[in-house]
Amino acid sequence: MRFISHLDMTRFMARTIRRTELPVWYTEGFNPHLYMTFALPLSLGFESDYDVLDIRLLDDDYDISLLPEKLNAVCPPYIRFFDAAEPVKKAGDVTAAKFNVTFDDGGKLKDALNDFFSRESIVVLKKTKKGGEKEIEVADKIKAFYLDQNDGNTVLKITLPAGSIENLNPELFLNKFYEETQNTVCYNVVRTAIFDADGRLFR
């Protein structure tokens, strides 16, 4: 699913929800559309184990515990719903996201990655809204990082700012690391959690 864009995923979810025939709410006006919001859009090329989707039901007495079963019944096996609950926070309350980056390196990059992410200064190029680029300091933006291993390969577990106020893509760091070390090792990025300002899982 990592090569499916956020827009395509949104279209897919709209069709999926319609197939369930759930009593969902549509916007009013000339061109009604299904009310649906992802808490934090996922970058193209990334996978996710944790996504939050907000929909609105017309029936206030509907048993929302049935939603995962209803949705999973019409979804392919690689997209699964695990829980449904009343919203506690708004999408604008998202402040951080955790990622697992698995390198196909046989464990060889662990020390170099630890040295890189432990630095007091990491300056990267980030694109501006006007299409240009500017240098920014990001070392102090890392909320937490930890290096592990899986099947002999290095796994970087990193938590970064995310949301409407500040959003840092892990590839900003990875591109800088690869540029400096001249590595060509493949890696895979999976988002594993989304957090609110209190450090709790967003839901």
Image (spheres, rainbow, N blue to C red):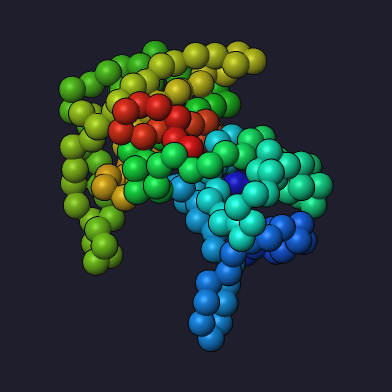
When the figure is inspected, residue 151 is found, relative to residue 68, above or below; the finding is: above
Image quadrant of residue 102? top right
When the figure is inspected, residue 174 is found, relative to residue 111, above or below; the finding is: below
Residue 108 is situated, as x and y percent measured from the top left of the image, at 49, 16
Residue sticking out furthest to the right: 73
Residue 85 is situated, as x and y percent measured from the top left of the image, at 57, 39
Taking 43 as reference, is 178 left or right? left
- Which of these two is toward me, 162 or 126? 162
**Residue drawn at the location 66% of the way across and 35% of the way down:** 82
**Residue drawn at the location 44% of the way across and 16% of the way down:** 147
When the figure is inspected, residue 102 is found, relative to residue 31, above or below; the finding is: above
Q: For residue 203, say whether it is visible.
A: yes
When the figure is inspected, residue 40 is found, relative to residue 116, above or below; the finding is: below
Residue 75 is situated, as x and y percent measured from the top left of the image, at 76, 50
Taking 155 as reference, is 168 left or right? left
Image quadrant of residue 172? top left
**Residue drawn at the location 18% of the way across and 46% of the way down:** 135
Count of numbered tags: 0
- Which of these two is toward me, 82 or 67? 67
**Residue drawn at the location 50% of the way across and 28% of the way down:** 100
Taking 194 as reference, is 144 left or right? left
Q: For residue 12, say whether it is visible.
A: no
Residue sticking out furthest to the front: 61
Residue 141 is situated, as x and y percent measured from the top left of the image, at 24, 32
Residue sticking out furthest to the bottom: 30
Image quadrant of residue 137? top left
